[in-house]
Amino acid sequence: MEKGKLLYEGKAKQLFETDDPEIIWVEYLNQATALNGAKKDQISGKGELNNRITGIIFDFLRKKGIKNHFIKHLSANEQLIQSVEIIPLEVVVRNVAAGSFSKRLAVSEGTPLKAPIVEFYYKNDELDDPMVNEDHIQFLKLATTDELIQLRQMALAVDQALVGLFDSIDIQLIDFKLEFGRRKDGSLLLADEISPDTCRLWDKKTKEHLDKDIYRRDLGDIVPVYQEVLNRLEKRGE
Ligand code: TMP
């Protein structure tokens, strides 16, 4: 498979054409950003870690019946994915209060939620990714009513699967962000990445952060922490 021209450059990944229009070549970058890009650093090793963690998680989810765009790893920091039209929504699922939820609603970080809470954010850098409800999504024509039902169902299925996966490696899944894409036939696929950049992961025993909050909150070096998540996931696979 040939790597073609650059199609899209995001904050943490570059997407390239291939000789197959249905397949995209992804390169995970060593760039970390927070505060909608206002905080930005190069962190050697981060791209490889997120590429490998995302592949393991997407393979796991596929085995659990959750269709996603991951095809295979190409190298330490590259993978092939199915081409989809990304729905401009970030779908956040929360199991425990933290981050913007805690701030906005004055609920202490670490408070368990009785049932998972699903939130939608409009992917729009100029607007700073505002939270939107289902009426807003329909008004803006971001997704259809039927797609919204599927998005919620798929997000909750991912939550159930990942809570179990992380629990088995002594990690509590606090919350995470998903993105979805449409295939040509209109079906939806889980897309983008699932990594410590896009999840809050707390060590079950020590409650230490094993995720990007280390970077967002200037708590230290993310590389050994992401490596720890990868090590636990790989050990589980043995
Ligand atoms: P939040 O508490 O800042 O709203 O974040 C909720 C979850 O979503 C957390 O696991 C981090 C993840 N997330 C992203 O992956 N990308 C984003 O742009 C934001 C705002 C959150």
Image (cartoon, helix red, strand yellow):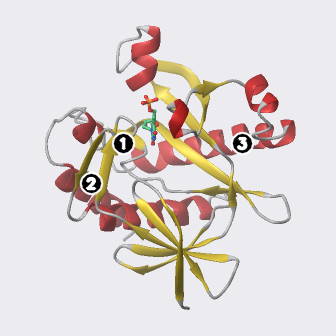
- Distance CA(mark 3)–CA(mark 1): 27 Å
Q: Which residue is mark 1?
A: 37
- Distance CA(mark 1)–CA(mark 2): 21 Å
Q: Earlier in the sequence, mark 1 or mark 2?
A: 1
Q: How many marks?
A: 3
Q: Earlier in the sequence, mark 2 or mark 3?
A: 3
User: Which element is circle 3 on?
Assistant: helix
Q: Residue furthest left?
A: 220
Is label 2 in contact with label 3 (beta carbons under 8 Å)?
no
Identity of the amino acid at label 3? Leu
Is label 1 in contact with label 2 (beta carbons under 8 Å)?
no
Q: In this rendering, is residue 214 above or below 231?
A: above
- Tell me the tag on residue 226: 2
Q: What x and y, as percent, mark residue 127?
A: 54, 31
Q: Earlier in the sequence, mark 3 or mark 1?
A: 1
Splitting the image into 4 quarters, where does residue 18 fall? Answer: bottom right
Q: Residues within 10 Å of mark 1 (few under 14, many from 20)?
A: few
User: Which element is circle 2 on?
Assistant: helix
Q: What x and y, as percent, mark residue 238?
A: 36, 71
Q: Which residue is mark 3?
A: 151
Identity of the amino acid at label 2? Tyr
Is label 3 in contact with label 1 (beta carbons under 8 Å)?
no
